[in-house]
Image (tube, rainbow, N blue to C red):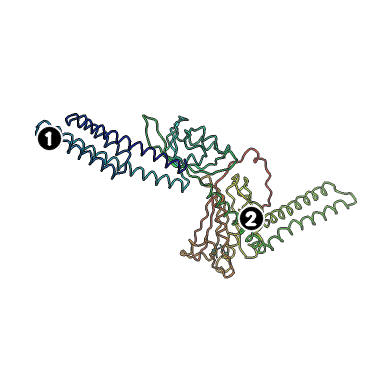
Amino acid sequence: MSIIKRCKALFLSDALAWLAAVTVGSMIFIINSLLEIDVAPTLLYITLVFMSANVFSIPVFLTAAISCVVILTISFIVDEGYRDQRLIAGFVRCLIALTTITLLALRSKRATDTLRRKEAFFLGAQKLSHTGSVGFIPDDEKAVSWSDESARIFEYPLDAAPTIAMIRARTHPDDLPIVESVLQQAARQECLIEVEHRLIMPDGRIKYVQMIANPLFNHGGRIEYVGALMDVTASKHAEEALFHSQAKLAHVTRVTAMSELAASIAHEINQPLAAVIASGESCKRWINRPEPNLEEARRSLDRVIQNSCRASDVIACIRALSRQSEVQRKAEAFDEIVSDSLSLMQHDTASHQVRAHLQLGASGAYIQGDRVQLQQVIINLIINACQAMANVHDRPRTLRINTSINNNEAVLEVADSGTGIAEDILTSLFDPFFTTKHNGLGMGLSICRSIIEFHGGRIGVTSTVGLGTQFFFAIPLTALTHDEQSPSAVGFGV
Ligand code: ADP
């Protein structure tokens, strides 16, 4: 409703209230002058007090109530009621009733005003924070209530009576199972229901909402859930924008890391190429014999094809690392990502005289993510580990890379026997631009953290100065869909 319409409605209701008050007041006056003071006029005074309590502000209401008492007293005096014992008792009864009612009405008016003010604050806060209230009773599709802000979030008219069907109609088809799971949780009377899902508006716009609800009221055995619904679309978009900027920055650091990996890359490609040449030569020899051995020649050709594929995989992997591609989210075999990353680093670790031990304990574990980004995290952890061991001369330089499955998460641990990290800087490691290296950028670990968090995981570190450091990260596992179950992994093993 527009402000002008609201003002008009307010003015009209005020005018009607005044009219009613004047009518009741005149009736009291007439009745008072005709009848003796007793119950009937008192009831009218009480009606007037209640009316003014409902429609006027506290000062006007008090003025009306005091006026009633004054009129009552004046008519008592003018009628010389004090001469009659019975009239005095009636007057005192009226006075007590009127005062008590005035005090009670005043109390309830104050409570109502406070409630109204709180409601106004609450509605304002809901509008500003894009948070609405919702209430629903499980197993009753029509027992739904919501605040104006919730109606605005769902983009329904404010006066439309909400139903579960209306909520389903606005839910993104892919997220309908989430809404159904909320209803099932409510039917099981779970203590706290917390979900995030997408809505789709009639014009195709997507909104992200978060809902949290608790079972609060019991209506004759039927539990009502009451909670809050927040439109988090803006923060989702901001998160995405931030992630894209970070992805660009990640690309820059990846390209920087590529230059450090040049020797490893050359080695990775040289190895299969040398094997191709050797197999090609031997194939030629088998054919050039006086009696050509075609079986051996065929085997040599198989090795040529195998090694050529491997070289091509290596190049594809390097191209993927250096390309600024859009973030991909695919089901990937966790162990494969780890072993491919270490493969790329093999020459690098060797040149740092680091012995790498790889223990893969997450076979069959798949995660939903971007292979290139995760490889970047692992490569970064390995480069840091090698650098941390560069000054270690009194003990073997060992790098242990373990994968495992724990609590429905794929876990990677990268442990080195390097210099270790002092406890006071341990908490700053993941801060952007934190570095202790004179030529360091300090972005590596910060990017690692945002990549892992983007994958719904967490990253951490423990360290002992003089003994070494262990970095770990954990990413939720994913189940393979039917289409993803056909093997298509490209990579090169250790
Ligand atoms: P940069 O390598 O450019 O300094 P990072 O974000 O990768 O940036 O690392 C931040 C800091 O964390 C490093 O400067 C170093 O002090 C510390 N650090 C990271 N990994 C290790 C490690 N394995 N051992 C010791 N210190 C480490």
Quarter of the rendering containing residue 218: top left
Q: Amino acid at mark 2?
A: Ser
Quarter of the rendering containing residue 262: bottom right
Q: Is there any visible trace of residue 417 in the rendered image?
A: no
2 or 1: mark nearer the eye: 1
Question: Mark 2 near ligand 1 (CB under 8 Å)?
Answer: no
Lateral position of residue 324 relative to residue 146, left or right: right
Q: Position of residue 445 (x, y in %)?
A: 56, 60
395 is higher (above) or lower (below) than 119: below
**C-alpha separation, residue under disc 2 versus residue under disc 1:** 107 Å
Lateral position of residue 280 relative to residue 211, left or right: right
Q: Position of residue 417 (x, y in %)?
A: 54, 63
Checking the image for residue 341, the label placed there is: 2
Taking the spot 32% from the left edge, 34% from the top edge, the residue there is: 20
Question: Of 100 and 339, which appears nearest the observer?
Answer: 100
Q: Secondary structure at mark 1?
A: loop
Outermost bottom residue: 438
Q: Amino acid at mark 1?
A: Glu
Quadrant holding the C terminus = bottom right
Q: Secondary structure at mark 2?
A: helix
Residue hosting label 1: 80
Question: Of 164 and 322, which appears nearest the observer?
Answer: 164
51 is higher (above) or lower (below) than 429: above
